[in-house]
Amino acid sequence: MIFDVSVQGRTVKAEVKATTADSYTVVIDGRPHVVDFRETGRDFASLLLDGRSFEAGLERREDGFVVHLPADNIAVVLQEAARGSAAAHKKASGPSRVTAPMPGKVVRLLVEAGQEVAAGAGLLVMEAMKMENELRAPRAGRVQSVAAREGLAVETGALLVVIE
Amino acid sequence: MIFDVSVQGRTVKAEVKATTADSYTVVIDGRPHVVDFRETGRDFASLLLDGRSFEAGLERREDGFVVHLPADNIAVVLQEAARGSAAAHKKASGPSRVTAPMPGKVVRLLVEAGQEVAAGAGLLVMEAMKMENELRAPRAGRVQSVAAREGLAVETGALLVVIE
Amino acid sequence: MNLKKILIANRGEIAVRVIRACRELGIPSVAVYSEADRLALHVRRADEAYEIGPAPSRESYLRMDRILDVAKRCGADAIHPGYGFLSENAAFARACEEAGITFIGPRAETIQAMGEKTSARRIAVEAGVPVVPGTLHPVASDEEIRREASRIGFPLMLKAAAGGGGKGLRLVPHADDLATAVDRARSEAKSAFGDDSVYLEKAVLKPRHIEIQVMADAHGNAIHLYERECTIQRRHQKVIEESPSPFLTPELRERMGSLAVALVKKVGYVNAGTLEFLVDKDREPYFLEMNTRLQVEHPVTEMVTNLDLVKLQIRVAQGERLPITQEDVRQTGHAIECRVYAEDPERGFLPSPGRIAALRVPGGPGVRDDSGVYEGYDVPIHYDPMISKLVAWGRTREDAIGRMRRAVSEYKVLGIQTTLPFFERVMRHPDFLAGDFDTSFVDVAFRRHEVVREAPWEVAVAAAAIQAFRDRKARRGALSQSAGAAPVSGWRVRGWREGAGGRL
Amino acid sequence: MNLKKILIANRGEIAVRVIRACRELGIPSVAVYSEADRLALHVRRADEAYEIGPAPSRESYLRMDRILDVAKRCGADAIHPGYGFLSENAAFARACEEAGITFIGPRAETIQAMGEKTSARRIAVEAGVPVVPGTLHPVASDEEIRREASRIGFPLMLKAAAGGGGKGLRLVPHADDLATAVDRARSEAKSAFGDDSVYLEKAVLKPRHIEIQVMADAHGNAIHLYERECTIQRRHQKVIEESPSPFLTPELRERMGSLAVALVKKVGYVNAGTLEFLVDKDREPYFLEMNTRLQVEHPVTEMVTNLDLVKLQIRVAQGERLPITQEDVRQTGHAIECRVYAEDPERGFLPSPGRIAALRVPGGPGVRDDSGVYEGYDVPIHYDPMISKLVAWGRTREDAIGRMRRAVSEYKVLGIQTTLPFFERVMRHPDFLAGDFDTSFVDVAFRRHEVVREAPWEVAVAAAAIQAFRDRKARRGALSQSAGAAPVSGWRVRGWREGAGGRL
């Protein structure tokens, strides 16, 4: 099984072959690794790679996993290559949709539709967990629309502002 | 739903009625308790009974639960009353089947078929977790049969000796 | 007088901390909880638990009437307020006194005098304790704020008079930023403390935040339990604390301890309290404020002094004398606390509430985890994002850092973002290892100097690819031998998208 | 000389303990494991891990050749043996020395002299340290055993010369029981240590087991780290240890410490070791044996002395001098250890291996959990049933007991039986609270004097009945609102039946 993988800004190919029930060969960009992989509880696995031992927490995401290793948590986005390598195409240009990065309440709007904003300009203030956080423009542009309303509670991912 | 319950040597009836999604009335031998019951993870629940708070670990067994409370672990055997109250009938008389209380290895047989044994007499020696343990006769009687063989590994519940 | 039953007027890890002390002393504990907190750990751990209102603090944890009502109904003869919420509310302490319930903290009049920051600054000035130049009274009108600001000069700090924990606190670099900062600070202060008055202080450049823990009984005995170094902050809120401070000389430590005890004795302070100081780069200490309550970071003091502050609070509240004198208090070894927040350090410490899908906590020697959560718990959006305090002790600072690094590597929180990866990096940062940092550490130094680590990304790719392979095989019914592994109930979806912005 | 990489020739919690020390010091660690232990925690926590053979210890953890081979292949320049297995095997220490690998423990010749119990007794006698009357040589023939036994008199103790940890140890009440006891002891000694020689000792009645921890460097410096009280045993194996001993007077503590240091200096001992004493009811100490290795119960000493014994072992093995003198060693507060075994205390401590379905570990102040297992782990039948050591520290013995009680109440192990409910009862037992017990505590006093507690059996019934109700509703598809609760994969079957017998 071949995967297109995005990890820490890299794009690589990873091919997985099962040799026995717990032993796999993973070829990452041409380099083979022999991996003894065992599940240790529902969200954890123990990996041995050429004698090196790693304890991994495997957090499932929509598009892959966040792998918790002792030194860091590493997001791995992956997709079976057979279905077309779409993984790398995500960062398209076009209008920027600013969405709620957390559940919370919209406290104040700082822009309105039609307004020009600089990159980093404040767009609105959200409150969550007793802190007010200013959401800023990811890039310069014109505010196409403002979906957020003051005082409204929003869920993660809710569309707030579109910048074109 | 009515249950026949065995707990710590007692036999009681317990009737459960759901009042809301998380609130129940449990009538134990005529005494009603209002219980706010919430699952807190897969094997745990939080119970509020008239203001008193209890954290319970719920370990599923073939015939009920072992309830882990802060002060003790309490085995609760229960059965729906509609199906006939068989829970209390388990301790029947007749031949005593001595079974392996743990997985391990039979190290030595101390009795043979036909032999008379006193209550508490050694029947055989098992080894598990590096310790030798002597299994003793639960009551006096004649050894009807010996299923165990020296040197053999056995699983929990394996029949070892029958005393009649 | 022995207390019979203690109600904890708080939630989260500090409520669990107090409940543990009660259980160890054999005193029954009572939890109160909001509608959002029925499943919170403090409810599960207490002997009794009662609901006191809807999720917003104003309607539950700040409702004195409901809390006192619960106390009376269940027969609690004492209330521990924890920190935050009503812990520094003089009216609440007074209401307890009037209801015949022991408030485990200072007397109401002391809370009023020392808890209100401008009043505390005046008292400190009178007692000869140096303070940062600024207003000695809360400033009401925007006009007066502008006048005082130009008198003091920029940069300056805007602070909620009733505040604490970094809320309602703003650095104002220039006069241009003043109006916005005042609005923001007032709004936060109002929502956090129900009081929007603010005051102004000159900003001390490259300061260290160092505080002195004190403990006093009702018989006139007062001691200090040395200092805590609290310089490492994000958004003016502490994230890492330690004791001893790598910055203090023995002389300065002695001097600050004596200043603290003098001030405490002057106001007839009773129970636990903390005097916060700024220390500038010339090692001059300025008294900032007094927190008339237990502090989040009290465990570092407990670990270096071998004392249990909550038990001491309870004993003092029972009218007992302090069981120790200043000479008995020793600073042994070194302790570091890391505040584990449900926040994403990669995105400007943005809050990250949600379900904790899996949790593994560190153990072994010299490690203490004061947690308020559990596996399967939903971290709510309504309250402070701190989920745990991880504390490590060692014989030396180096030992403590090694232990903290090890503990962080064992700590796994799946399902939400936490500050743990941030701590992993701090514990390797050369400036932190050298003890060379000021309050700008997180914002400036840390970003500039990215720590180079071996990032085993290939291992992450191998793990993810194999798990994906197994999931797909399992779904296709081809992998019949994966008996031990229970199928996962669902994909965990959290769509972080562009637009979360840089410096939130 | 700094060690570059340490191989841990052990498994379970002690391997994890040593790996933690390595990680804190920044030294890479190497685990070895048997086929049964691929999923063991020490494999997951080490930096590297290599298989060394099938499940039986004789074919894996006792295979010196394979372990040394791994060390050479992976470039480990030191081996920590933990306790048990090869830790007191002089041949192994010598093989390490010959292979140029640092054995983290005493020199091979010291292990030989002190590890073999009859030889250690002879040396003690020569050094003027009192010993229990008995044979000063291993006794080979059954004939000689009978002769020596009648010389010493009954009751007597039969002990494996190479033994430790209660294995190959038998109390022989009468001459009639001798033959059976010899068979049993030899067989256990053979399987545990590969050596079936035994020796005899007079049984001291109502004794206390008290041991002295020592630490010595290669430069002739030796210190003792005070005593541990290890009297509470089941099947001659310790279950609860504490320091200080509630039984020792300051004078006796001083005397035993001095005897220990004298003996250690006499034999030129290096690294950590423990001298075990029996103390009779007249407070006369008798030297029993020396354990030339780290002890299971070392954490209680670590907690009262604020020292890390494993790190000290590594430093001494690196050739460093002890960083402290006898005067620096203080006994601060009180520590208690409870050994959490996978055993059923209700059934004579019968082993209870199996899958840990759920695990919640205690946290908070003064509690240390040195665990070798995790949620989802299958405790194997092949090895020692100890899964964790729970340690609590307090300023006083009463404090420590309160804390242990609290920690035990937080500790949840589902799926297997453990000794935790036993500890809950011990921590309330009047004899334990009074410090008034001898080695018969578990077998006699504890059974006779059942502690009366409020057993909230109605709560257990309510919890079980509601859960059963919910399960049935869920199965009948009627309860659609139980969204958060993942269905449980299967019923956990463990059919305890009659016949497990009384006193196993």
Image (cartoon, coloured by chain):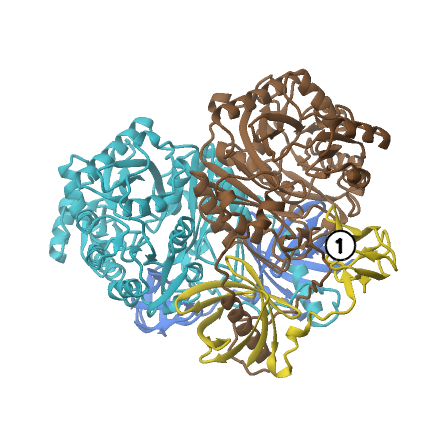
Chain colours: A yellow, B blue, C brown, D cyan
Please, which chain is the residue tagged with disc 1 on? A
- Looking at the image, which is closer to me, A112 or C98? A112
In the displayed structure, B85 sits above or below D449; it is below
Residue A110 in sight: yes
Q: Position of residue C305 (x, y in %)?
A: 49, 31
Task: Using the image as rendered, state which of residue D404 and residue D309 is in the foreground.
Answer: D309
Q: Nearer the viewer, residue A65 or B34?
A: A65
Residue B29, image x, y percentages: 68, 54
Quadrant where the N terminus of chain C is found in the figure: top right
Mark 1 crowdedness (10 Å alpha carbons): few <14, some 14-19, many ≥20: many
- Asked if residue A106 is positioned above or below residue B91 in the image, the reply reads above
Q: Which residue is mark 1?
A: A136
Compared to residue D198, the image places residue C296 above or below, namely above
Q: Is residue B121 left or right of residue C33?
A: left
Say whether residue C113 is visible.
no
* Residue D15 image point, x, y percent: 38, 55
Q: Is residue D219 left or right of residue D308?
A: left
What SS does tag 1 mark?
strand
Q: Quadrant of residue A156?
A: bottom right
Going by the numbered disc 1, the residue's amino acid type is Arg
Name the residue rendered at 19%, 56% in the picture.
Answer: D94
Residue C340 rendering spot, x and y as whole percentages: 60, 48
Task: Looking at the picture, tell me which residue is in the foreground, C25 or A159.
Answer: A159
Which quarter of the picture shows residue D9?
Answer: bottom left
Q: Count the numbered circles shown.
A: 1
Position of residue D141 in the picture relative to residue D452 (left or right): left
Which quarter of the figure has residue C102? top right
